């Protein structure tokens, strides 16, 4: 039956409204957990705790913890499992630590992050390095304290530590080279700066540097949800596929935005990737093909979640938001 005029726009507005509500509630849950878990600014040594909080509470969208919580909710069939907010907060700590270090003069040398001075600009390089170290340590301490079965906590620790590292000792127990490690991807990104990017190089960097943490946010959330409802191997494989495709799509869109938006719109310095001859998707494929590739990846990600039915709808809406966003 043909749709009535305006039906598509109406459904888009409904989806936008539901995603806005999902994001708002996820931010509130994550920020409450972070506030509880992070040392107060008055806790000595003051400088490092204030630096940690400066970067953590600089206005991030909390996409990774929200993806984590919605994956947990999908597997648990509607309810948030115990401690999943803490797991999401730990993932946000890891993400923030990576941003602090990524912004340092020795790496990207950025002065602006989320519209505010970067950590090393506000607190000095030494404290910024240590603040990143401290956030990483607190993240793993938090994961080790999750209120879940020990085997689930160990599985989450194994999953996340592999995604954050250099790709050695991944969750399957088999060395697979650099992918899926975030730090490994950062190394390749640094060493390839100024080199003409190739398709293989760009995909390697994107899947490791950015995609790995997004994918592991979703997979670890699903593992947390399995404490409420058992998760079969095929289901976990489908969730991993969803996470990997959504993570790659996210970074492709990030590359496009870096070339098409202003620093004010992005909340960080725009155009630095092109100026540094960095390996980006648009540098290889162009902007229009990049947008098409991101949309195709999200379509494939949706297909991976089909067996989960209606409980997967919020996670799909978030994935769509990843490619539709403008900042």
Image (tube, rainbow, N blue to C red):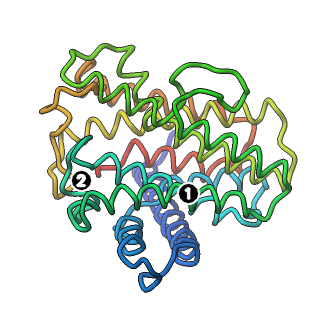
Query: Which residue is at 41% across, 66% downward?
Result: 56
Q: Residue furthest toward the left?
A: 275
Report if the CB atoms under discs 1 and 2 are less than 8 Å apart: no
Query: Which residue is at 58% across, 73% downward?
Result: 37
Side (left or right) of 248 relative to 278: right
Query: Which residue is at 35% across, 54% downward?
Result: 100
- Residue 323 image-quadrant placement: top left
Q: Counting residues from the N terminus, which is met first, the one under dot 1 or under dot 2? A: 1
- Residue 125 image-quadrant placement: bottom left
Work out how far the residue at label 1 is from the one at label 2, CA to CA, in angstroms.
29 Å
Q: Which residue is mark 2?
A: 266
Mark 2: few/some/many CA within 10 Å (<14, 14-19, 20+)? some
Q: Nearer the viewer, residue 42 or 147?
A: 42
Query: Which residue is at 51% across, 23% downward?
Result: 178
Q: Residue furthest toward the bottom?
A: 42
Determine if residue 110 is in view: yes
Q: How many marks?
A: 2
Q: SS class of the residue under badge 2?
A: helix
Q: Which residue is mark 1?
A: 137
Determine if residue 14 is in view: no
Residue 204 percent location from the top left of the image: 43, 22
Residue 201 percent location from the top left of the image: 36, 17
Residue 274 percent location from the top left of the image: 16, 31
- Residue 302 image-quadrant placement: top right
Q: Is residue 71 above or below residue 323?
A: below
Q: Nearer the viewer, residue 155 or 287?
A: 155
* In this rendering, the label closer to the viewer, 1 or 2: 1
Residue 30 percent location from the top left of the image: 55, 68
Image quarter hosting the N terminus: top right
């Amino acid at each position: 039956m043909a749709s009535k005029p305006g039906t598509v726009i109406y459904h888009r507005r409904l989806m936008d409204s539901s995603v806005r509500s999902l994001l708002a509630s996820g931010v509130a849950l994550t920020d409450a957990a972070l506030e509880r878990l992070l040392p107060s600014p008055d806790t000595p040594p003051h400088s490092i705790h204030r630096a940690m909080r400066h970067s953590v509470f600089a206005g991030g969208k909390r996409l990774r913890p929200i993806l984590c919580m919605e994956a947990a909710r999908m597997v648990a069939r509607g309810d948030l499992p115990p401690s999943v907010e803490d797991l999401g907060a730990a993932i946000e700590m890891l993400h923030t630590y990576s941003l602090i270090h990524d912004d340092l003069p020795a790496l990207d040398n950025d002065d602006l992050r989320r519209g505010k001075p970067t950590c090393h600009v506000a607190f000095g390089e030494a404290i910024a390095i240590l603040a990143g170290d401290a956030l990483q340590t607190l993240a793993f301490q938090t994961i080790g304290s999750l209120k879940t079965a020990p085997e689930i906590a160990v599985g989450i620790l194994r999953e996340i530590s592999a995604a954050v590292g250099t790709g050695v000792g991944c969750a399957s127990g088999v060395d697979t080279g650099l992918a899926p490690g975030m730090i490994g991807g950062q190394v390749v990104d640094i060493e390839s700066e100024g080199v003409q990017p190739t398709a293989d190089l760009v995909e390697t960097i994107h899947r490791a540097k950015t995609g790995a943490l997004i994918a592991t946010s979703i997979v670890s959330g699903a593992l947390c949800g399995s404490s409420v409802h058992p998760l079969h191997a095929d289901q976990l494989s489908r969730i991993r596929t969803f996470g990997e495709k959504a993570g790659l799509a996210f970074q492709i869109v990030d590359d496009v935005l870096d070339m098409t938006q202003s620093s004010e719109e992005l909340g960080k310095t725009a155009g630095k990737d092109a100026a540094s001859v960095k390996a980006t998707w648009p540098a290889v494929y162009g902007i229009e093909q990049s947008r098409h590739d991101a949309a195709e990846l999200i379509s494939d990600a949706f297909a991976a979640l089909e067996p989960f039915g209606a409980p997967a709808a919020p996670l799909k809406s978030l994935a769509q938001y990843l490619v539709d966003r403008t900042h």
